[in-house]
Amino acid sequence: MYRIRPRVPMAVVRRLPKYYRYLGDLMERGVGRISSKEFGRLLGFTASQIRQDLNYFGGFGQQGYGYNVEELREQIGKILGLDKKYNIIIVGAGNLGQAIANYTGFQESGFALKAMFDINPRLIGMSIRDVRIRDLDDIEGFMLEERIDIAVICTPKEAAQGVADRLVKAGIRAIWNFAPEDLEVPEDVVVENVHLSESLISLAYLANERETGGIGEEQRAERNNARA
């Protein structure tokens, strides 16, 4: 069993999905156990970093044996909440919203897309992977009827805050925000921002640094952590 300790650093939390993904790859290759050193080599982290991260949640692995790949993945999945099912909706059914809706990996991880919403009459009534695009004006009624755990915002910048306000009033407590806008929400609402332009600009900086003198060790470590 794992134990949740308070105030786990966010950097640790962001590395856990990468651990989970790589452990899944190892299972597919038939690997039954792995040492922290071998695992770190795959991930681009040190063995010490991996042990420190996992120690926030309890004891995993055995000295001289390493980690049981399947068991460790199962425990990390529980830490991440992947032993539960989550109902999600997407607000904004343009190119980005449709691309997210078409990604099959979400369903495989326990995220069920229940509906999409938009204001464009040309999109309303269409279906993406059997999920109907609805009028945004119907969102409050829909959320009264369905238990929705996560809302994905894929609207233009100028619409994002208004959509977030409506979602919060309708009871949402977790928002995955792709709009280039920092949302203002109550403290009990969790927001994960994915600003694509900022990520691309960061990549441009790193590429420029490589051309003009290379990436230092500190930048390289930050880049590896960002991959988590």
Image (cartoon, helix red, strand yellow):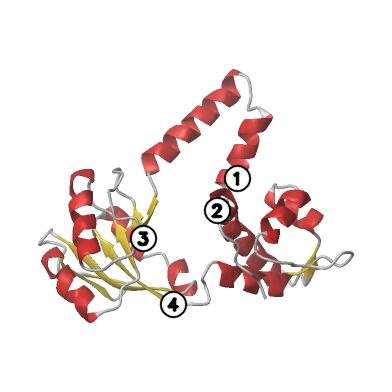
Image depth: mark 1 or mark 3 in front: 1
Q: What is the secondary structure assignment of the residue under circle 3?
A: helix
Residue drawn at 62 percent across, 19 percent down: 213
Between disc 1 and disc 3, whose residue precedes? Answer: 3
Look at the image and tell me whether residue 173 can be seen.
yes
Say if mark 1 contacts mark 3, CB within 8 Å.
no
Q: What is the secondary structure assignment of the residue under circle 4?
A: loop
Q: CA distance from mark 2 to mark 4?
A: 20 Å
17 left or right of 148? right
Q: CA distance from mark 1 to mark 3?
A: 24 Å
Q: Quadrant of residue 16?
A: bottom right
Q: Which mark is residue 85?
A: 4
> Which sits in the foreground, 192 or 40?
192
Q: Which mark is residue 14?
A: 2
Q: CA distance from mark 4 to mark 3?
A: 18 Å
Between disc 1 and disc 2, whose residue precedes? Answer: 2
Between disc 4 and disc 3, whose residue precedes? Answer: 4
The kind of residue on which mark 4 rests is Lys
Q: Where is mark 3, residue-wise?
A: 100
Mark 1 Cα shell of 10 Å, populated few (<14), some (14-19), many (≥20): some
Q: Where is mark 1, residue-wise?
A: 225
Mark 3 Cα shell of 10 Å, populated few (<14), some (14-19), many (≥20): some
Between disc 4 and disc 1, whose residue precedes? Answer: 4
Residue drawn at 30 percent across, 78 percent down: 147
